[in-house]
Amino acid sequence: MEQPVQNRSAEPFRLVVLVSGGGTNLQAIIDAIEDGAIQNAKIACVISNNPEAYALERAKKHGIKACCIRPADFSEREAYDAALLSALQEETPDLIVLAGFLVIVPKIIIHAFEGRIINIHPSLIPSFCGKGYWGLHVHEAALARGVKVSGATVHVVDEGTDTGPILLQKAVEVREDDTPESLQRRIMEEAEWKLLPQAIRMFVETEGKA
């Protein structure tokens, strides 16, 4: 049942960040909020599917609510999806940010927060995206193909995999001596950690509270 919309004009723009691993993109968001690059916004909660995710520790160190909702703790996927949806609705987010979240977002969540979920992907979509392209697999494929430029993309999440509208992209040079690991690191440093805070700032400035 939908809850009535409340007037929160005096409150900051609320973010919920979903993450599965170390949380370097989460850290980039935290830093951008703390240094004023993103204003009038707060991370209400960090949610992970992985209890060992260092991202949870990053959140706690900055006084941010953090929790883990594991698919393995539920007898069926529908129950997990419902639990994740409930946790998100409880936080009343203005924007949900997928910052290295290695779980397919269910349709019930996409529909509940339509147009308010964004994802960072480590390639220039439509290259090296979709099913099977995540983490180092993306960079391995880029190097195997011999591309000279890769990068990162922030896009709105829809029912497809990496198919939603593109918000921002940034290109990064691929070097002859690159390994998947070195390319991954440089794309994070030169593209991902800059694009994701920039995209959030765009949402805050266009849809946030005065």
Image: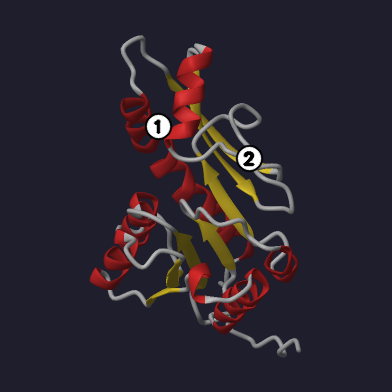
Q: Mark 2 is on which residue type?
A: Lys
Residue 65 visible to an observer of this rendering = yes
Single out the residue that lies furthest toward the left: 61
What secondary structure is found at the residue carrying circle 1?
helix
Q: Nearer the viewer, residue 73 or 125?
A: 73
Q: At numbered mark 2, what does the secondary structure look like: helix, strand or loop?
A: loop
Which residue was labeled with disc 1? Answer: 187
Sequence-first tag of 1 and 2: 2
Residue at left 74%, top 53%? 159
Q: Circles 1 and 2: CB distance less than 8 Å?
A: no
Q: Position of residue 10 (x, y in %)?
A: 52, 82
- Tell me the crowding category of disc 2: few under 14, some 14 to 19, or many 20 or more residues within 10 angstroms, Cα based: few
In the picture, the quarter occupied by the C terminus is bottom right
Q: Is residue 62 left or right of residue 42?
A: left
Residue positioned 27% across, 70% down in the render: 62
The reply, left or right, for residue 181 in relation to residue 38 is left
Q: How is the image coloured?
A: secondary structure
Quadrant position of residue 179: top left
Query: Is 139 placed above or below 23 here?
Result: above
Disc 1 packing (10 Å; few <14; some 14–19; many ≥20):
many
Q: Which mark is residue 210?
A: none
On the image, the x and y values in percent for residue 61 come to 23, 70
Q: Quadrant of the rendered structure where residue 190 is?
A: top left
State the residue position of label 2.
Answer: 131
- Which percent across, then down, holds residue 13? 52, 71
Name the one closer to the observer, 153 or 71.
Answer: 71
Which residue, as the protein is rendered here, is positioned at the far front? 75
Distance of label 1 from label 2 (alpha carbons): 20 Å
